[in-house]
């Protein structure tokens, strides 16, 4: 049996881990997976040539490369499926809740930044939901559900981008910056809570490193909306909100494309 270690430079958090798991699901040569998110590495226990493994990972555009590959006599990966299901359910609930909160607040405050951030929450919810639902399902069923979810997410991103463009060329209302800032701070706390729940079972050192890596993307998004809210206040203009909105919609669209590649 082979033990191959992959460096995956764009594996930032548990959402990417779930995408990789689904992408590799069904490969008969794979005996086990051991993820190390803090170091952005994946150890795969397998038979045969690892080329097909890296090809599947790279189809997600996660920039994977082989660090080393050695022969092993056995491997031991602790099976914590019930605990992982519980954690996934918790973070799924938090993400869905804040998707609804941010989407509602976005429409009330006329903020495309909040609406876009809510779709980012929805994107994570889809990943965690698929990971939960897919347990024990046929591979073809998992792929079909991922495809539907990807198209749905892509459609929402496209609709949001069109609305941002419409407001750019039109005369949309100035967003309520107070709501933008307040809700984004709550979303930032929610993201931190999710990451804590996902990483609390690991040692403290790994937890700290993993949290700093995993929160980077979500912190940038939440901070971007907060900054846009401040700029709306200072300039009395809707443009800062529209700019952050289109940026996040593009990120959500890219996530949808990766989903479709599952």
Image: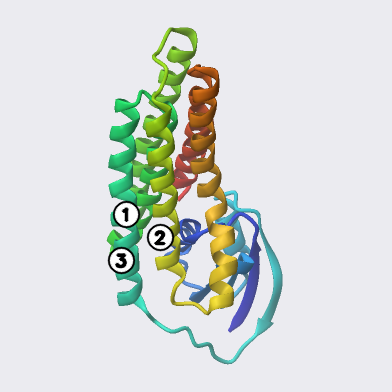
Q: Is residue 83 above or below residue 95?
A: below
143 shown above or below 34: above
Q: Nearer the viewer, mark 1 or mark 3?
A: 1
The residue identified by callout 2 is: 193
> Viewer-proximal residue, 183 or 171?
183
Which numbered disc, 2 or 3, marks the residue that appears first in the sequence? 3
Left or right of 98? Residue 184 is right
Whether label 1 touches label 3, CB < 8 Å: no
Pointer 2 with pointer 1, Cβ within 8 A: yes
Q: CA distance from mark 2 to mark 1?
A: 9 Å
Query: Residue sitting at 54 percent across and 58 percent down?
Result: 214
| Location of residue 185 by image quarter | top left
Q: Position of residue 25 (x, y in %)?
A: 43, 64
Distance, label 2 to label 3, CA atoms, is: 24 Å
Report the side of 194 relative to 135 (left or right). Answer: right
Q: Which residue appears farthest toward the right when viewing the image?
A: 67
Q: Which residue occupies the foreground of this view, 260 or 85?
A: 85
Q: Secondary structure at mark 1?
A: helix
Q: On residue 135, which mark appears?
A: 3
Q: Quadrant of the N terminus?
A: bottom right
**Do callouts 2 and 3 mark residues in contact (Cβ within 8 Å)?**
no
Q: Nearer the viewer, mark 2 or mark 1?
A: 2
């Amino acid at each position: 049996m082979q033990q191959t270690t992959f460096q995956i430079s764009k594996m930032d958090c548990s959402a990417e881990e779930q995408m990789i798991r689904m992408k590799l699901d069904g490969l008969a040569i794979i005996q086990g997976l051991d993820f190390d998110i803090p170091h952005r590495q994946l150890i795969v226990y397998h038979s045969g040539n690892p080329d097909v493994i890296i090809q599947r990972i790279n189809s997600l555009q996660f920039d994977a490369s082989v660090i080393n590959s050695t022969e092993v006599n056995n491997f031991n990966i602790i099976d914590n499926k019930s605990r992982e299901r519980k954690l996934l359910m918790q973070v799924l609930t938090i993400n869905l809740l804040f998707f609804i909160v941010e989407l509602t607040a976005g429409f009330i405050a006329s903020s495309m930044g909040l609406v876009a951030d809510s779709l980012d929450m929805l994107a994570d919810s889809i990943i965690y939901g698929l990971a939960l639902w897919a347990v024990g399902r046929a591979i073809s069923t998992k792929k079909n559900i991922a495809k539907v979810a990807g198209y749905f997410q892509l459609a929402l991103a496209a609709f949001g981008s069109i609305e941002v463009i419409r407001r750019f060329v039109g005369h949309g209302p100035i967003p309520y910056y107070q709501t933008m800032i307040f809700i984004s701070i709550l979303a930032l706390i929610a993201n931190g809570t999710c990451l804590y729940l996902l990483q609390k079972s690991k040692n403290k050192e790994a937890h700290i490193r993993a949290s700093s890596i995993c929160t980077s993307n979500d912190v940038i998004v939440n901070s971007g909306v907060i900054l846009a809210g401040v700029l709306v206040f200072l300039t009395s203009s809707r443009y800062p909100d529209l700019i952050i909105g289109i940026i996040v919609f593009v990120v959500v669209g890219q996530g949808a494309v990766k989903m479709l590649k599952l």
